[in-house]
Amino acid sequence: MVLFFQNKNHPLELCFLLQDLLEIGYQKDVVLKNTKNFLENKSSNNILKYGNFQLLPNQNDAIVFRRSLRDKSLLCIFNRSEHQKNIKIPSTAHSIDQIFGNSDIQLVDGNILISELQKNTGLIIFEN
């Protein structure tokens, strides 16, 4: 199960955590708060609200999924390891825009290349 929380600095941006974070010490009230924030924001984003969900193959200790609606999608990536990662994800997008997170991203030959995604962080990339 994927949980989301609102970025305090940018209210329209979302980040995500995984339910298994409970196993490493997150309190239930924090998870409930994050879930509530996601549900409140999900209704304002049509891709999150109506889009199809696709879990992508394991990316070396990163969780990657895509929510798609018509010809647009959001690609959500969470690096849950203790090391920064370089990740390559196939994409049919014509353009991409990083809407949450901080990492170098490029669209090259039908792949999204993510350089040095920091440990325990996430990205949301808009694919158009």
Image (tube, helix red, strand yellow):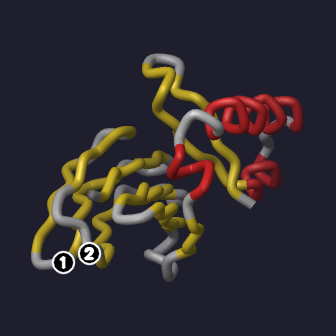
Q: Are marks 2 and 1 in contact (CB under 8 Å)?
A: yes
Above or below residue 80? Residue 49 is above
Mark 1 burial class by Cα count in 10 Å: few <14, some 14-19, many 20+:
few
Between circles 2 and 1, the one closer to the viewer is 2
Disc on the earlier residue, 2 or 1: 2
Q: Position of residue 125 (x, y in %)?
A: 35, 51
Q: Amino acid at mark 2?
A: Thr
**Helix, strand, or loop for circle 1?**
loop
Q: Amino acid at mark 1?
A: Gly
Quadrant housing the C terminus: bottom left
Q: Percent position (x, y) of residue 10?
A: 44, 21
- Across and down, in percent, residue 61 comes to 51, 70
State the count of labels.
2
Q: Residue furthest bottom?
A: 57
**Vertical relation: 21 (above or below) 39:** below
The residue sitting at 42% across, 64% down in the picture is 70
Judged from the image, the secondary structure of the residue bearing numbered disc 2 is loop
Q: CA distance from mark 2 to mark 1?
A: 6 Å
Q: Which residue is mark 1?
A: 110
Image quadrant in which you'd find residue 105: bottom left
* Structural crowding at the residue carrying mark 2, measured as other residues with C-alpha within 10 Å and reported as few (<14), some (14–19) or many (≥20): few
Residue at image position (53%, 66%) is 63
According to the picture, the residue beneath numbered tag 2 turns out to be 92
Residue lying furthest right in this view? 28
Question: Residue farthest to the top?
Answer: 9
